[in-house]
């Protein structure tokens, strides 16, 4: 019932089907163009997260991201370690002010704040996710030290040199322009401090002239609210152009003992992440269908389930062919002075 009541987020329940129609039309499968997605990224991404957030939380938990994973490690354990790794790379110290860019409902924010004893501010442009995040912050008791700002990460209402560290977990891929996004992060970060991120990228193995590769990329874009998936090279160039010094960067998917896409692979079964398996998704699909038929979930809910399923297929194929990674990691530093 939480899933059913959450579908559509802040969208009026009677308008969910119309929102699904409008969202789908932004994408290649429905004749949409990349220029339109870039120009209307705020509307597109907001619609996506209004429609998809309750499905994410139902199937994935509070942290909407993949993770490098060891053999014998559960999905939830790997997700927490992935977040702790980020905090350690940033060298976070108690009392520091940290910015989470594109924070979702704040799962990583809460984990990193408790792990490092820092004050983390989540930046998000989706009202529904922020309201959900604030509720969860209160439940775990970090609402006094952690908060949210509703804003576009392309134009943050934050003074220059405000934060001791900034991170982004599979979020800035929603930006229509990597350079513009990284430049804003550079501006709000204090001199001498670091920005770390996991980026969704196409790898060097991606061939833009290969029709199968194009299809996989388009499936991921529609199923995950993306204007365009950039290459690792483009991300690195944008970071340098924004003024950052690159400390180190690596595609962490390459050395993950357990493939990052395994939870979504229909050939894999796990009781600990049952809802993500083929059987679990079959039950979810039929439950959503029944709830929509009974009027307990808004019309259009099953369509959301459909494009999320399509994204899962694209992600698995992209992972198996090694043309896509959700964890291109980089640690970058803002120089102490512009001349450094």
Image (spheres, rainbow, N blue to C red):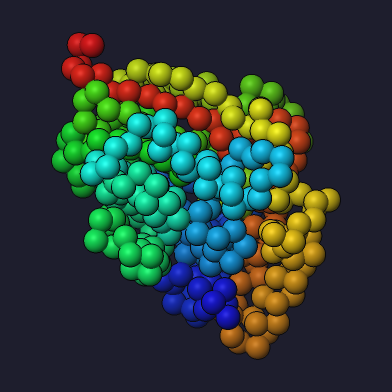
Q: In the image shown, does 225 or 236 lie closer to the viewer?
A: 236
| Whole-percent x, y for residue 104 in the image | 43, 55
Looking at the image, is 62 positioned above or below residue 28?
A: below
Q: In which quarter of the image is the C terminus?
A: top left
Looking at the image, is 339 positioned above or below residue 174?
A: above
Left or right of 122 in this view: 52: right
Give the residue furthest to the right.
267
Q: In the image shown, does 228 or 329 lie closer to the viewer?
A: 329
Q: Which residue does the image show at 67% across and 38% down from the upper left?
A: 70
Q: Which residue does the image show at 74% across and 61% down from the upper left?
A: 271
Give the residue furthest to the bottom.
294
Give the residue furthest to the top.
339
Left or right of 221 in this view: 238: left
Q: Can residue 334 be seen in this view?
A: yes
| Whole-percent x, y for residue 66 in the image | 59, 45
Left or right of 306 in this view: 34: left
Q: Which residue does the image show at 59% across and 58% down from the upper left?
A: 60
Looking at the image, is 153 positioned above or below residue 54?
A: above
Left or right of 304 in this view: 142: left
Q: In the image shown, does 71 or 27 lie closer to the viewer?
A: 71
| Whole-percent x, y for residue 273 in the image | 69, 59
Q: Can residue 177 be seen in this view?
A: no
| Whole-percent x, y for residue 253 in the image | 63, 32
Q: Which residue does the image show at 76% across and 49% down from the upper left?
A: 265
């Amino acid at each position: 019932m939480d899933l059913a009541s959450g579908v559509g987020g802040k969208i009026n329940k009677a308008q969910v089907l119309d929102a699904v129609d409008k969202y789908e039309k932004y994408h290649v499968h429905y004749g949409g163009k990349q220029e339109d997605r870039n120009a209307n990224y705020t509307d597109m991404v907001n619609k996506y997260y209004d429609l998809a957030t309750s499905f994410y939380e139902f199937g994935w938990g509070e942290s909407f991201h993949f993770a490098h994973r060891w053999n014998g490690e559960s999905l939830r354990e790997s997700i927490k370690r992935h977040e702790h790794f980020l905090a350690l790379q940033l060298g976070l110290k108690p009392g520091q002010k940290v910015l989470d860019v594109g924070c979702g409902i704040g799962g990583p924010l809460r984990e990193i704040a408790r792990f490092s004893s820092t004050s983390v501010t989540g930046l998000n442009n989706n009202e529904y996710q922020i309201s959900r995040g604030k509720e969860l912050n209160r439940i775990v008791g970090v609402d006094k030290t952690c908060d949210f700002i509703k804003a576009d990460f392309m134009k943050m209402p934050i003074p220059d040199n405000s934060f001791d560290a900034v991170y982004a977990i599979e979020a800035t891929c929603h930006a229509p322009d990597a350079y513009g996004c990284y430049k804003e992060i550079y501006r709000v970060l204090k001199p001498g401090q670091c920005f770390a991120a996991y980026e969704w990228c196409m790898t060097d193995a991606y061939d833009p002239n290969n029709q199968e590769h194009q299809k996989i990329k388009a499936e991921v874009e529609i199923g995950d609210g993306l204007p365009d998936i950039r290459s690792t090279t483009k991300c690195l160039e944008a970071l340098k152009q924004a003024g950052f010094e690159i400390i180190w960067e690596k595609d962490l998917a390459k050395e993950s003992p357990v493939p990052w896409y395994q939870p979504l692979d229909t050939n894999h079964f796990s009781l600990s992440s049952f809802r993500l398996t083929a059987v679990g998704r079959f039950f979810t699909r039929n439950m959503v269908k029944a709830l929509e038929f009974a009027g307990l979930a808004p019309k259009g809910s099953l369509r959301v389930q459909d494009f999320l399923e399509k994204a899962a297929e694209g992600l698995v194929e992209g992972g198996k062919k090694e043309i896509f990674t959700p964890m291109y990691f980089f640690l970058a530093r803002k120089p102490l002075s512009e001349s450094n």
